[in-house]
Amino acid sequence: MIQTIRQSFWKRWSRDYLHHLQRRPKWTRRDPELQVGDLVVIHESTSPPLIWRLGRIKETYPGSDGLVRVVLIHTQDGDVKRSIAKVTKLISDI
């Protein structure tokens, strides 16, 4: 029962909140780039949102256009490189 409620919560959170954070209005405005020190959620298509990892950006890699395209993220399991399409910045105005 509790597991079903948790999965329902994460499914809705992923669908509504994360998609809101990750909107991509192409070519109309530029969102602030990910920066070293930002707290992020790493999207894993092979696992449910309940076990997606959190991490902090350790390094950024810009593309040929100068925009950040790939980031190195420090997690509790070590460092991983991910495309910015697989990463969502968490708002940390706490």
Image: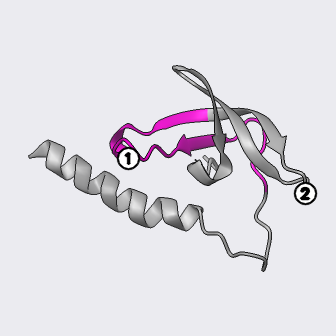
Question: What's under tag 1, amino acid-wise?
Answer: Pro
Q: Does 48 sit left or right of 27 as displayed?
A: left
Q: Mark 1 points at which residue?
A: 49
Residue 71 image point, x, y percent: 72, 39
Q: Position of residue 18 (x, y in %)?
A: 49, 59
In this picture, residue 94 sits left or right of residue 2:
right
Instruction: Please tell me which residue is depicted at 76% across the width and 49% down the height of the picture.
Output: 69
Quick one: 87 or 9, which is closer to the camera? 87
| Amino acid bearing label 2 | Asp
- Earlier in the chain: of badge 2 and badge 1, it is 1
Whole-number angstrom distance, CA of label 2 to CA of label 1: 32 Å
Q: Where is residue 51 in the image (x, y as percent from the top left)?
A: 37, 37
Tell me where the magenta segment starts and ends, as one range: 33-55
Mark 1 residue element = helix
Tell me which residue sits at (47%, 62%) in the image. 17
Select label 2 or label 1 by which is in front. 2
Q: Is residue 13 or residue 47 the one in the foreground?
A: 47
Q: In this view, does 41 lie to the left or right of 8?
A: right
Q: Residue furthest left?
A: 1
- The residue identified by callout 2 is 65
How would you rate the neighbour count of disc 2 (Cα within 10 Å): few for under 14, some for 14-19, many for 20 or more?
A: few
- List x then y, in percent, for residue 9: 29, 55
